[in-house]
Amino acid sequence: MKPIYIFLFIAGLFLNMEQLCANNPIYEARKNAYIDNALANFNGDAITIQAYKGVPVDSVALANQVYDVTINTTADFGIVKLVRVLMLSHGEYDSTILPALRNIPFWLEKNESLREYWSENHMIQWMSSDWLLHEKYGKIIDSTLEKRLRHYLDLKVQYGFYEFFSSTYGPYCLSGLLNLADFAQDAQIKSQATLAAQRLLKDLLKMANDKGTYFPAAGRNYYGKYDQPYDQNHNNLIYLLTGFGQPPTGASHAGGFLASSSIDVDDIINSWTPTLNTLFTLGHTLQDGISNINNTMSPKDKVIFQWSSGAYFDPLVAQATFQLVKDLNLWDHFEFSDFRQYSFLPSSLAPTIAEVASSITKSSGIYHPTIAIFKNKSVTLSSIQDFWKGKVGYQQWPVIANTGTTAVFTISGTPTTNWDDRPAIHANTHLPYVQQKDNIALVMYRPEKGLALFGYKDAKLDVALHWKNEKFDEVRESDHWILGREGNSYVAVRRECVGDINGVKACDNPDGQTWVIMVGNIDMYNSFDNFQNIIEQSQYEEKWYFNLPTLQWVYYSKIVVDGKTLEYAWNGDIFSGPTRVTTGIQNLKNNTQFAVYPNPAKDNISIDLSAFGNEKVTIKIINVVGQEIYNEKLSGIQSKTINTTTWAEGMYMINVQSGENNFTQKLLIKR
């Protein structure tokens, strides 16, 4: 074979290999259009694209970014962009960027009060930047960086992301991963970062609908991500990968990274499906993280990895957390300042304190959730099943419906007309129990009374419905149900009550509330009229009862609709019963009840038994520790007076048994 033909043959092989490795031409064309648009409509997030295209990076935007990383709490969000500019360029920006990074610590040190290093999005941005600066410029790194970086990447590939389905934090995780996937010199780190980035993007498309919107139940998120359907950081990623939704007006942080990345996205794009109905569990348990998964890390890094799963003051890690905060003097940091009042206590007491305060210490954890997802073209419904029910929510969004471009959800806490005014950290003052079957979710709220000890409105329970009539083409109401239609997509919500608080559809029942959410579309139910007809045939039940053998108050709800039954009996202790409902219960004759007066009582109580007529009854009175302090069988009397002078102050439970029926009420002795 002549040399020229050998050359052409080898060149053809290389061209074919390049074509095999390249992403599909439709994606490449969309990416190039995105880049052109970003350059034509410049903003500060486009500096990575300028560096990628080899055009001069805007000097003002670059200077602003360099200055911001020296003062911002979230400096790592800017540092990953600066590192990408360094990696994509040829040294022309080194003298501008590198001096600004020289004095910034890239991992948690003593007396830190400004920056956060431990949430998983922060971790990968700090670690990836530190590692790449080390590889390219010889930056001195701490002794644990390489080990914890490899461990982090292995965790994400094997277990997924703690901040699951977060349209806030996921894109920032992606930026750190893409920097490693594109520029790491270490082959294993490069490969694992690529796999982790691909997994994160597949998670994004799992909940993206055919209109390019993304309203998922999430481990960490902010309200704004559910208020607007387009032109947010995550929308840029969805549009680049699928072309769904509205073209972005300019570059976003994550969009600039993906558009300038060389990772293979074909499998990611092919993973999107218009329909999905699944239930799956993510991650691992906290105990596994402590005893096995993170056990090879240094003591400090092990605690930080546990923090990355939201386990700050969980009783299992409270002592390690407390000791590290003490050792590093982090009491001035915003994440720990609320606990400064306990800083004088020995660390050995931390687990006990954390257990007493479990209603606020456990529920920040976002490990090992079970997630239900239903998607049919434009409609989606997703939820986190039985996740820290009754406890304080920490940025968790437990149940969300979407009719195309409109999010519908319930949330607990004082309603306000301006949803942006709600606390960003504790999005729910009480997390609900959620059970989802296919396209229907039962959402029950019952606060832990212990929350009152920590200033949560005396554990008052308000639940508001995020529902904006103007977002729908048609809105109907039928009894407790409200129904909305957006195009050919439908949603229905059964409210706990019909009314509003502060101009928001909300209920203030402090004991317990049950809401039901159902989605559908024209493919599933044909017309909106038929959807409404099925809703109106539903059967609903809600009640309280006292389970005497277990000394528990039970809050029970049940919905039967569209051939599906969802029900749950929520058990609580002797003090967690209703304050507005005084009858209870098991095998109850609905027209039979008894009264106790006075209540609160001091020296005597009278029990009105007139409703029982001449029936034989047994009166039992139980104290707070479950001891029976009174038991008497009576027949044919109208009232019974009992002396309580010798009883201790506190709560008691009075049970009246008639035949197979039990009736209960709470009594408070107060002097």
Image (tube, rainbow, N blue to C red):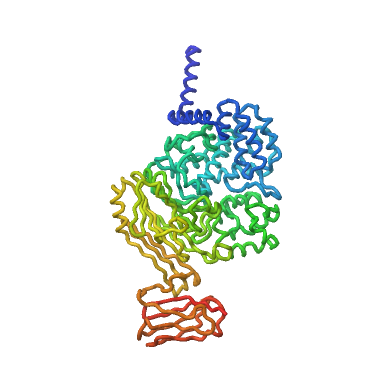
Residue at the front extreme, as displayed: 503
284 and 307: which one is in front? 307
Does 124 sit above or below residue 60? below
**Residue 157 percent coordinates (x, y):** 52, 43
Q: Is residue 235 left or right of residue 48?
A: left
Residue 533 position, x and y percent, is 29, 54
The residue sitting at 32% across, 59% down in the picture is 538
Q: Is residue 441 shown to the viewer in this render?
A: yes
**What residue appears at the point 60 percent right and 52 percent down from the top-left corner?**
307
Depth check: give the residue in front, 216 or 484. Answer: 484
Query: Viewer-proximal residue, 3 or 457?
Result: 457
Q: Quadrant of residue 239?
A: top left
Nearest the eye: 621 or 251: 251
Residue 567 drawn at (x, y percent): 38, 62
Note whether residue 365 is visible: no
Q: Residue at x 52, y 36 (%)?
A: 255
Q: Position of residue 65 (x, y in %)?
A: 63, 36
Picture quadrant of residue 80: top right
- In the displayed structure, 448 sits above or below 403; it is below
With respect to residue 386, does 7 lie above or below? above
Q: Specify whether 344 is left or right of 437.
A: right
